[in-house]
Amino acid sequence: MTAALQAVIVGAGPAGVRAAQTLVAHGVRPVVVDEAPRWGGQIYRQPPAGFTRPKRTLYGFEAGRAEALHSAMAGILDRVDYRPDTLVWSAEGGRLDLLCQGQMSTLPYRQLIVATGATDRVLPFPGWTLPGVYTLGAAQVALKYQGCAIGARVVFAGTGPLLYLVAYQYAKAGAQVVAVLDTASFKDKAAAVPAMLRQPALFAKGLYYLGWLRAHGVAVHQGVRLLRATGGAQVAAMHWRDEHAEHALACDAVGFGYALRPETQLADLLGCRFAYDGLQRAALPERDGAGRSSVPGVYLAGDGAGIMGADAAEWAGERAALALLADAGKPVAAARAAELEARLARTAAFRVGLERAFPFPQDWAVSAPDELLVCRCENITAGELRQCVSDTGAREMNRLKAQTRVGMGRCQGRTCGVAAAEILAQACATSPDAVGRLRGQAPIKPLPFAAKVQTQEEAA
Ligand SMILES: Cc1cc2nc3c(=O)[nH]c(=O)nc-3n(C[C@H](O)[C@H](O)[C@H](O)COP(=O)(O)OP(=O)(O)OC[C@H]3O[C@@H](n4cnc5c(N)ncnc54)[C@H](O)[C@@H]3O)c2cc1C
């Protein structure tokens, strides 16, 4: 029997676009909602209309893939209800709450594909709130979207594949990259080689970025620890240490991050079951190989359900759409579905290698000083979080939030949540999975006070 279809996709990145394309190919007209002004997501983010930089400059090796994804969406625009500049700020059974140009509205759905992507995983260091200190993602967005650099002499720090990629992109664009400071060691990377060879092309790209940086005189230090950023009105130096000594690098900007964290808030509000993933050191919404969540009619695709990268996001988006269609009683190609699942399984094996090559710095919490600002929205330090544990016996993230307001500000824990959980686990001498996760709360991103609710007449 064929069920009624009323499909909505949240996110027009690689996962969302391929999901939309698949639904359209099967005669379904989905609604595609994205808070960004143009489709493409993070990796294939498009510059504002009127900017004319060639794709090769914007996306480097990925120019062909970017072009393919952009034209895939352009080719179906007349067969989707595409809603750019539209934030989904809340969700509950069968309906989404939207904000577009200051106007609130609701959008009903029967089937929903959540393809909301990821953001930087932030582990703060003293001085991280100084002007001139950005996350790696923000540094890249400035370059890709607007053709701006975050500074003229930039230090890139933290760990993860994005660290080397963004440093390479900045150096190639003409900025002076003072150094790359990687908390992962050369040994970590050597141990990860066998698993990373499962995707030789991606592995080779990583080696190329590293080799290019070194060949162009960019200092790359591995196995370091970040100590602090210092400066006055603007960051002026980044301090770090290796096994021998402390060092300081003069700079006017810092880009930092420790890989990515999935944007899971919508899945959470929708009641999807979560499970802790030791590899990604995060609680993730559960999904089967096809992208079905624990909630009937809700499908999860791309980095929003677990970091797998852009190619995997495209496959997961298509696979989730096929699952949605099959569940609604529409015939789909079983062989294609199986092929996509096999590709995703191969990528998962490669991800194990990446996590080994760029491991989470396990000693971060223990070395975070008490005066370190963890939650910048509510101005809460590591010491205050530790004090709360000893004063109140809090052992769970939502308890810590209720007692201290950590994660209660504008970012809703999207920036500070990982660090706060690490500090709590360290203070309780337990592991991060034992302290739980911040429950999602609407609005998942800030709403303006001036936002207007759409009347029934306006909606009609
Ligand atoms: C800042 C940043 C830069 C990156 N750059 C690179 C890179 O250069 N190379 C690389 O290989 N990988 C990069 N990555 C990783 C890469 O982007 C992902 O692997 C890939 O884009 C995942 O695709 P996706 O469709 O799952 O999510 P995304 O591409 O992130 O797309 C998600 C989309 O959902 C939308 N969205 C999210 N939440 C909402 C909401 N509540 N309401 C409405 N819309 C919403 C977003 O606007 C976005 O367009 C980057 C990641 C980040 C965070």
Image (cartoon, rainbow, N blue to C red):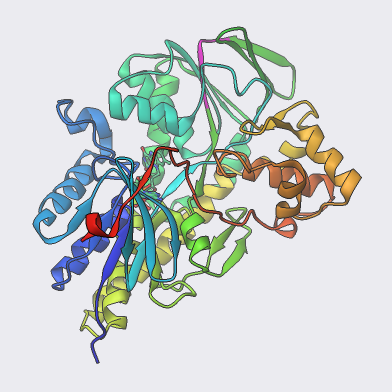
Q: Nearer the viewer, residue 332 or 407?
A: 407
Query: Residue 54: x percent and y percent?
Result: 16, 29
Q: Nearer the viewer, residue 353 or 6?
A: 6
Query: Residue 86: x percent and y percent?
Result: 31, 47
Question: Looking at the rendering, which quadrant does residue 398 occupy?
Answer: bottom right
Residue 379 located left or right of residue 296: right
The outermost residue toward the bottom is 1
| Magenta span contains residue 33 | no
Give the answer, above or below, for where 132 lies relative to 99. Answer: above
Query: Residue 289: x percent and y percent?
Result: 42, 72
All told, the count of numbered labels is: 0
Q: Main secondary structure of the magenta part?
A: strand
Q: Residue at coordinates 42% horizontally, 26% vertically from top-left? A: 139
Q: Nearer the viewer, residue 392 or 148?
A: 392
Q: Residue at coordinates 57% horizontally, 53% vertically from top-left? A: 280
Question: Looking at the rendering, which quadrant does residue 123 occupy?
Answer: top right
On-image quarter of the N terminus = bottom left
Give the answer, above or below, for where 48 lies relative to 241. Answer: below
| Magenta span contains residue 254 | yes
Q: Nearer the viewer, residue 396 or 288?
A: 396
Query: Residue 161: x percent and y percent?
Result: 47, 39
Give the answer, above or below, for where 163 lies relative to 86. Answer: above
Residue 5 located left or right of residue 375: left
Residue 358 located left or right of residue 296: right
Q: Is residue 452 visible?
A: yes
On-image quarter of the C terminus = bottom left
Residue 27 located left or right of residue 447: left
Residue range (magenta): 250-255
